[in-house]
Image (cartoon, helix red, strand yellow):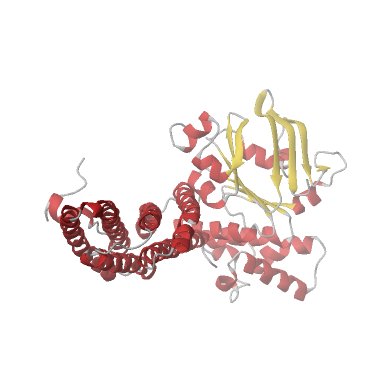
Amino acid sequence: MKEIKIAVDNLSLSYGKNRALKDITMNIRDKRVIAFIGPSGCGKSTFLRTLNRMNDLIDNVRIEGKVYIEDVDIYEPSIDVVNLRKKVGMVFQKSNLFPKSIFDNIAFGPKLNGINDKNVLMETVERTCQQSAIWDEVKDRLHEPALSLSGGQQQRLCIARALAVEPEIILMDEPASALDPLSTAKVEELIHELKQNYTIVIVTHNMQQAARVSDFTAFFYMGELIEYDKTTKIFTNPANKQTEDYVTGRFG
Amino acid sequence: MERHFEHQIEKLKTRVIKMCSLVDEQVEFALRAVDEENMELASLVKERDNKVDKYDVKIDKICQKIFALNQPVAMDLRLIMSSLTINSNLERIGDIAVNLAEGAMLLKQKPSFWGRTHIKEMSVLAKEMIKNSIDAFIEGNAKLAEKVVQSDDRLDSLNAENHKILIEIMKETPENIEPAVHLLVMSRQLERLGDHATNISEDVYFIVEAEMIKHNYEKYLFGEDEEDDQD
């Protein structure tokens, strides 16, 4: 199927002897928002990080099974991980901006890719800030330090920075958990906007957030994918008893 | 940037308003079928009832989805809670329109004693109450909603008078029993239309003013000072 952006086939991951992910198989459709939910330690963040090989950076990790992005196995030895991470961008729980100006933070990736034309860089900064709904707040202060922005603004700037290298997939690991409700609402609204052009996978501890922003929800428990379905189905009539207990707050 | 949630709310409102206009038209057609002795119009009302039922299910589903996914609060919560009950009242109004259309088919033509009853006046009043309750919902107009609630007494007393008149007619001329029973049922249906319009208006009042006026709730059940949320 053309619509499938990411296909995961029997993926298992172990940290030493500890099996953190067990035989995960799932398809993620293009230009949709997919939320991963589950109690702490269920493997949802670990699984997210397998999608752009961030776990490669951890010692003692063993991965079995396959992850295909548009039919390409991303764990093939020939894969250029830098290119992979260009295609699969990531936004973390805490904003991790460079101690540079707002402009330089966004221009950093494109510059690394050899783009030095100031006009092109400016266009990229404006486009990505517009897409991240932060343009009006930063357009008159592009050369001020990025770290002078508020927490919510910094997180949206991180999203703008991720967009600057023109990814197709954006992974978000608890992108709003350190933000106040108003900034959270802005980030959630942004996710709704971005899914017109990107596939978004989001890990969240906040079930209501998963309900609000996603089209599909996957429930993980103890390294297993328990249930994966349309978000409406998961939150109105889940098929699995464990999912029902979790979404209704009876455990976890 | 349009809020995604607001979009969902707008979608719900649009569905409810569409159902309102369909149901309003069903009542209009059913009453005309009786008044104009128009059997084609009566059949049309019966045929279109499944459209009303479809809206009923759709609205329930949207409300369920919004509750599950968006955890509405304050005015949004009142709107969605009330949309569910408004929806079920609209569905009942649709059923009554079908009953009235069936009544028109049974009667075929208005009996000679038609003019002695209050059916015509009740039809006009019930229709007006439905229209006003719908307008109150669309405009968020609590004053108009109150007006509907106040009109219900008039409809109730016309129905009570109709009973007396029709029993009298049946006593006078036993051959009139059958058409008189049809009108008795019709009178009761019209009175029920007023009840449903009243329920809708009470919900509109709740959406706009955050105050429950059904069953004269706060004033009569609890008194001014008493808390109403004691377990």
Q: From where the camera sits, is residue A73 visible?
A: yes
Point out residue A147 in the picture as x, y percentages from the top left corner. Answer: 57, 62
Quadrant (top left, top right, bottom left, bottom right) of the N terminus of chain B: bottom right
Q: Which residue is at 19% across, 55% downward?
A: B173
Q: From where the camera sits, is residue A98 visible?
A: no
Quarter of the image for residue A138 reads bottom right
Point out residue B201 in the picture as x, y percentages from the top left corner. Answer: 30, 62
User: Is residue B176 shown above or below A7?
Assistant: below
- Nearer the observer, A241 or B106: B106
Point out residue A51 in the picture as x, y percentages from the top left corner. Answer: 71, 43
Point out the residue furthest to the top here.
A17
- Nearer the observer, B228 or B160: B160
Point out the residue furthest to the right here.
A78
- Nearer the observer, B62 or A38: B62
Point out residue A91 in the picture as x, y percentages from the top left corner. Answer: 63, 52
Quadrant (top left, top right, bottom left, bottom right) of the C terminus of chain B: top left
Quarter of the image for residue B124 reads bottom left
Quarter of the image for residue B137 reads bottom left
Q: Is residue B5 left or right of residue A14?
A: left
Q: Which residue is at 37% across, 71% downward?
A: B139
Q: Which residue is at 55% across, 63% downward?
A: A153
User: Is residue A9 shown above or below A156?
Assistant: above
User: Is residue A79 shown above or below B136?
Assistant: above
Q: Is residue B17 left or right of residue A225?
A: left
Q: Is residue A129 left or right of residue B91?
A: right
